[in-house]
């Protein structure tokens, strides 16, 4: 090799090292996934933060504690980016905090009445962590465990695969449940979440994503002027503790009707009993999607920024929650104070309390079966 050849080889090697984890695509944008330490849990486990960037400059930051999306930066109609999910700056606040900001909820997202269910003749008892019911998997649900992680960079989109094996009996649930969640930030500006799981004993499962969105920005105040469309003719009415009563009611003629885009604030203080029970919206809509087809569940539009979010899912239900329990006691990223109704959640799911409601779509996973669910949050501006 001549000296020139050696120089070229060195330059090529350095270029390769510099651009590892970064790819330029046909649009000229750069997409990547990088990681760095985020902190340590109280019991000394290392937590990393992964930064996924797509070729349009959208950025999702995700930690392997709880699979939490800590930030999601998307452009408005003028191309200005803002972080549109609530969150904290450090692991300690995520560990101490109750609102499930950005997390994966499981094994069973939402409520199981009185923390009890019976499966194959055996009664199971779960923690009552939302008196008098069980909520989001219990005292240490999937939002509070450290997942193993693997950065995946396909030819097109940066992705992060998280894995967690929940031991038999964890939080009172039967069976060893081996779960995977893959977050992909696609180049059509979608945060896609694919869930899978297998078990060695029959067990209920219901995984969801619990980001608190504010399309004007995480620190932009209330979400009452966001316009919402929910692709659902029906919802599951609840008792005063938010447990479905087992019936399916039509949304028609009620403040639950979002079949045409309507501002969140238009009817949120209505005297309709269901709204009173929820302290606002905190209900499961029965999506018009049929038979696990991946279809549009809802859209959200914020007029001043022009940001528009579509939610697509394979799930039969969606919990639309308007941050009714936020009360200003959470101080989040950059000192932002998150107050009443400063964000909303769109939690795609099986219906709450399904383990006790044989009339609802089954949430039971059996040995030999694979649980799969796909949900996508797609962003644009107009
Ligand atoms: C879900 C529930 C709400 C609330 C939040 C977390 O959306 O339906 O009632 O518990 O989670 O604060």
Image (spheres, helix red, strand yellow):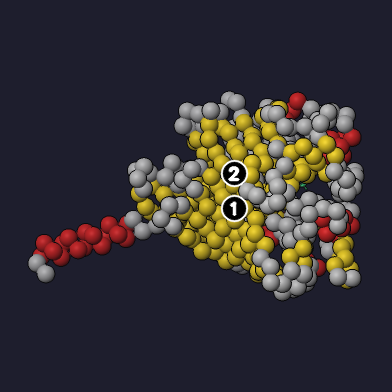
| Residue 40 makes an appearance in the image | no
Label 1 to label 2, Cα distance in Å?
8 Å
Asked whether the beta carbons under mark 1 and mark 2 sit within 8 Å of each other, the answer is yes
Mark 1 close to ligand 1, CB under 8 Å? no
Q: Nearer the viewer, residue 245 or 217?
A: 245
In the image, residue 77 lies at what x, y percent?
Answer: 50, 29
The residue identified by callout 2 is 377
Give the residue drawn at x 53%, y 31%: 381
Q: Residues within 10 Å of mark 1 (few under 14, many from 20)?
A: many
| Residue 249 makes an appearance in the image | yes
Rendered image quadrant of residue 228? top right
In the image, residue 233 lies at what x, y percent?
Answer: 77, 37
In the image, residue 63 lies at what x, y percent?
Answer: 57, 56
Q: Nearer the viewer, residue 292 or 22?
A: 292
Q: Residue furthest front?
A: 291
Q: Quadrant of the N terminus?
A: bottom left
Give the residue drawn at x 85%, y 39%: 249
Q: Earlier in the sequence, mark 1 or mark 2?
A: 1
SS for dot 2: strand
Rendered image quadrant of residue 163? bottom right
Give the residue drawn at x 27%, y 57%: 15
Taking 155 as reference, is 175 above or below it? below
SS for dot 1: strand
In the image, is 247 to the left or to the right of 306?
right
Give the residue drawn at x 11%, y 62%: 4
Instruction: Give the label on residue 54, or none.
Output: none
In the image, is 352 to the left or to the right of 298?
right
In the image, residue 221 lies at what x, y percent?
Answer: 66, 32
Mark 2 close to ligand 1, CB under 8 Å? no
Instruction: Give the label on residue 193, or none.
Output: 1
């Amino acid at each position: 090799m001549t000296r020139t050849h050696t120089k070229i080889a060195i330059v090529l090697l350095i270029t390769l090292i510099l651009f590892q984890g970064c790819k330029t695509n046909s649009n000229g944008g750069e997409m990547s996934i990088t990681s760095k330490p985020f902190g340590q849990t109280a019991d000394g486990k290392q937590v990393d933060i992964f930064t996924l960037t797509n070729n349009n400059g959208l950025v999702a930051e995700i930690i392997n504690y709880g699979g939490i999306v800590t930030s999601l930066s998307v452009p408005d109609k003028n191309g200005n980016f803002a972080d549109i999910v609530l969150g904290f700056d450090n692991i300690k606040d995520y560990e101490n905090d109750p609102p499930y900001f950005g997390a994966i909820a499981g094994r069973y997202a939402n409520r199981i009445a009185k923390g009890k269910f019976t499966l194959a003749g055996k009664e199971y008892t779960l923690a009552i962590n939302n008196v008098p019911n069980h909520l989001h998997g219990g005292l240490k649900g999937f939002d509070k465990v450290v997942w193993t992680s693997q950065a995946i960079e396909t030819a097109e989109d940066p992705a992060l695969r998280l894995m967690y094996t929940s031991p038999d009996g964890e939080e009172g649930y039967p069976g060893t449940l081996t779960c995977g969640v893959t977050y992909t930030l696609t180049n059509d500006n979608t945060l896609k979440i694919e869930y899978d799981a297998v078990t060695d004993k029959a067990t209920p499962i219901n995984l969801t994503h619990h980001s608190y969105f504010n399309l004007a920005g995480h620190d932009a105040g209330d979400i009452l002027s966001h316009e919402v469309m929910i692709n659902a003719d029906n919802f599951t009415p609840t008792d005063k503790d938010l447990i479905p009563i087992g019936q399916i009611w039509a949304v028609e003629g009620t403040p639950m009707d979002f079949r045409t885009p309507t501002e969140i604030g238009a009817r949120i203080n209505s005297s309709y009993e269901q709204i009173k029970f929820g302290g606002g919206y905190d209900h499961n809509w029965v999506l018009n999607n049929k038979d696990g087809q991946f279809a549009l569940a809802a859209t959200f539009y914020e007029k001043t920024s022009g940001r528009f979010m579509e939610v697509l899912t394979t799930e039969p239900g969606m919990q639309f929650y308007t941050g009714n329990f936020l009360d200003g006691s959470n101080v989040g990223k950059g000192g932002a104070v998150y107050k009443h109704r400063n964000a909303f959640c769109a939690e795609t799911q099986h219906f709450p309390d399904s383990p006790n409601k044989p009339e609802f779509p089954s949430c039971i996973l059996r040995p030999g079966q694979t649980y799969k669910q796909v949900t996508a949050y797609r962003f644009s501006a107009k």
